[in-house]
Amino acid sequence: MKITAIYPGTFDPITLGHVDIITRASMIFTKVFFAIADVQKDTLLSVEERFELAKSILFPLTNVQVCSFDKLVTASAVDLGANVIIRSIRSADDFDYESQMAGMNRRLCASVETVFLKPAEHLSFISSTLVKEIASLGGDVSEFVDQNVVVKLKSKFSQ
Ligand code: COA
């Protein structure tokens, strides 16, 4: 059975935690859209920058397609022919929020199911916000993000 999934997020920036999740998803589903949300205004990186970074990092995953979306995630899933939304649960703290969002998405579109994946333990503490904070203060984030992201953050914070 062929199942297409969508992994939506802000990805500002994409971290090794996100890469871990999309890699796991690519091994389970026939095709996975790595869908970058263009719905929040206050991001450090533009949607084009987030898109280019994701493409440069995820190209080895041949059944993964990077895209962006500016509407409801359920509507985007339907447009893309995806019937699974992938979300990541790093810890119990993530669960309440993710469970609420999954419930709401189910009410919006009953034909799209949310599936939770857990990242590797050593990546479970990474967040994009902490990565940006460390990088903005000159810290080394190379353990948490791809080298292309390291370079991009350096250029952003040296402006
Ligand atoms: N590794 C690293 N970080 C992870 C992670 C993982 N495996 N899983 C989650 N995170 C982090 C993210 O980096 C982010 O960190 P930050 O807050 O420090 O930036 C945080 O968890 C939240 O993840 P994110 O992917 O940004 O999701 P979100 O909670 O901001 O949700 C959308 C964004 C786009 C999925 C959601 O708002 C959405 O679907 N919007 C479209 C409009 C819509 O349909 N709304 C109705 C929803 S019911």
Image (tube, rainbow, N blue to C red):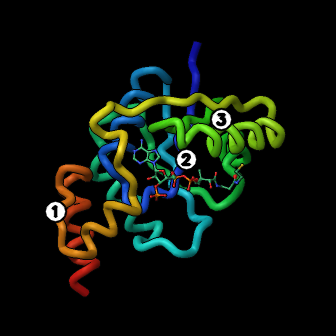
Q: Secondary structure at mark 3?
A: loop
The structure residue drawn at horizontal position 45% and vertical position 42%, both measured from the top left corner, is: 65
Give the CA distance from mark 2 to mark 3.
14 Å
Say few, some or many: other residues with alpha carbon within 10 Å of mark 3 (under 14 / 14 to 19 / 20 or more): some
Q: Which amino acid type is shown beneath numbered disc 3?
A: Gly
Whether the residues at callouts 1 and 3 have beta carbons within 8 Å, the answer is no
Identity of the residue drawn at 25% across and 69% down: 135
100 versus 4 height, above or below = below
| Between marks 2 and 3 in the image, the one whose residue lies nearer the viewer | 2
Residue 157 placement (x, y as % from top left): 26, 79
Q: Which residue is mark 1?
A: 140
For this rendering, which residue is in front, 153 or 95?
95
Q: Earlier in the sequence, mark 1 or mark 3?
A: 3
Q: Residue at x 18, y 73 (%)?
A: 138
In the figure, residue 149 lies in which quadrant?
bottom left
Dot 1 or dot 2, earlier in sequence: 2
Name the residue at the front extreme: 92
Residue denoted by label 2: 8
Q: Position of residue 140 (x, y in %)?
A: 16, 62
User: Mark 2 near mark 3, Cβ–Cβ under 8 Å?
Assistant: no
Q: Which residue is mark 3?
A: 81
Q: Is residue 89 left or right of residue 141?
A: right
Mark 2, secondary structure of its residue:
strand
